Amino acid sequence: MIEVGCPAFVPLIEAGDLEAPALREAAAAYLEPLLAGGIDTVVMACTHYPMLRPLLASLLPPHVQLVDPAVATVQRLGPCSAASATGRRANARVIRCCPGISACGCASPVRRRRSPPGPPPARPMPSRGGGEPAGRPAVGHARLLGSRHDGGDVATVAELLQPVEADLDALLADLRNLIGAGHPILQAAAEHLFAAGGKRIRPGIVLLLSRAISPDGALTPRHRRLAEITEMIHTASLVHDDVVDEAATRRGVATVHSRFNHRVAVLAGDFLFAQASWHLANLDDLEVVKLLSRVIMDLADGEVRQGLFRYDTGQSFETYLEKSYCKTASLIANSARAAGVLSGLRENRLDELFRFGRQLGLAFQVVDDILDFTGSDQQLGKPAASDLASGYLTAPVLYALEERPALAGLIEREFSQEGDLDQALELVRGCEAIPRSRALAESFARQATEAIEWLPPSEPRSALRALPDFVISRLY
C-alpha cells in the first residue's frame, strides 16, 4: 500500500468551487502515475473525501475501486494488508491531501472489567504495544484510519457494538446511497458529516435490539432501514445544533457551516430530515412513522426549550429533564420502540423498549452534562464548560444552586464580569452537585438495564445490557 500526498487539493477545495477546471486538472495529475502503475483500489483518506468523491469517481476507470474511508475501509483493505504482510504486491493507493489523518470515531477508549477480544485474523490490527505486526508496511489500514489500542484494559465503542459490526459497516455505505444524487454542494455537505466519524451508537442500538428480539437473530430490510433513518435524523439534528451553537468543529472536524456557510448548513440539515422522512414513509407502517415524526418534533422542541431557559436560575429540574428527553433521549426511545413495532411485539414489551431507550438517553445526557465540568476538550469534542458559559443550566448547576445560592447572581448577570465563570466553576465543583448528578445518571442507567431483562440470552442482549455501564464509565 503506497500513500500519496496531494496538498494542492486543499486550497482548491476551500475555494468552494468543486467544479473548477483547476481542481479536475490537479486530480487527474495525481491519478495519472497511479493509473499507469496498474492500481485496482484508491482510498481517499482525509476529511475532504466527501467533496472529492464525485470528481475522483469520474476520473477513475471502471475496474478501479474507490474505497470509502471510516470503518468500512478496515474490512475492504484487509486483503491488501494481508498481501503486503506476506510480501505480495497490493495494488492499493492512498490519496491524502491533509497533513493529519482523521481518527476513526469508533476508537474512543472506555474502562472495561475484562480484556477486549482480539481482532479477527483476517483484519490485522496494531499490537497492544502500539507497534505494527511483523512484515507490515509503515502505512497500514489501521493507522490510516487512526484506529488503535494503546494498551491496558480498554475497549472501544466498536467492540461494544461488535455483534452488529458488519451491519454498521453496511449502514455507512448505504447512507451515501440514501441521500441520493441531489445538488452537489448539499450532497458533499451531507457526506462530509458521515465521513466525520462518530460512534454510531444510535443506529447500533436499533440493530442490536432488532437482532435481540428476532427469533432467529436475523435482521429484516425494514429494521436495517430504520437504523439508517435513525442515523440520518441524528446527523441532521447535529448540523442544526452546530449552527445554533456556532460550533466551529465536531469530532475534530470542521462543522458544515464552518466548511461551507450557514445557509448551506441549514439546507443540508433540512435535506437530511427530508430524506429521512421520505424513507420513513416508505417503511409503510403508520405507527413507526408517528414515532419517528415525534422525534423530529421533540428535537426542535428541545432546542427551543434550551434557548428559552438560558441563564434562568428559576427553571425547575423537571424542565431540565424534559429538555434532555427531547434533545437526546427521544430518538433512542422512539427508535427502540419502532424496532419492536416492526417485529410485532406486544404493547407491554414496546413500553419496555421505550423505557430502555428513554432511561439510557437520559443517563447519556446527564453524563455529558457532568463532563462539561470534569472532562477535557478532547473528550467532549467541544470546549469544556461551554454549556455553562452559554447559559445552559444542567443537572450539576441546578444541584449546585441548591447548595450555593451565590451561584445564582453570577448566572443571572450572564458571567459579565471578569472571573465570574471561573468562580461559578469553583462553586459547582466545590459542592455535592457532581456526585449527586453522577448518582442520578447511575439511577437512569440501572433502570435502562432492568427494562430489557426479559430479552432472551444472546450476544446482542449482552451488548445492550453493557451499554448503560459503558455510558457511566465515561465518567471514570
Image (tube, grey):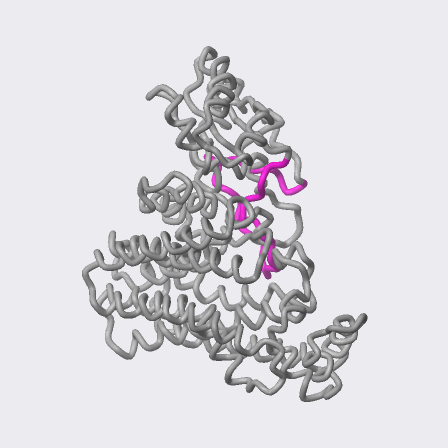
Q: Is residue 449 visible?
A: no
* Part of the protein shown in magenta: 100-129
Which residue is pictured at 32% across the width and 77% down the height? 351
Quarter of the rendering containing residue 280: bottom left
Quarter of the rendering containing residue 230: bottom left
**202 and 76: which one is in front?**
202
Q: Can residue 243 be seen in this view?
A: yes
**Residue 251, how many percent across, how many down?**
57, 51
Q: Which residue lies furthest to the left in this view?
A: 284
**384 and 70: which one is in front?**
384
Q: Which residue lies furthest to the right in this view?
A: 419
Q: Which residue lies furthest to the top in this view?
A: 36
Classified by dominant secondary structure, the portion drawn in magenta counts as: loop
Which residue is pictured at 57% across the width and 47% down the height? 254
Q: Would residue 119 be counted in the magenta stretch?
A: yes
Above or below, comparing residue 177 to residue 45 in the picture: below
**Residue 286, how many percent across, how many down?**
20, 67
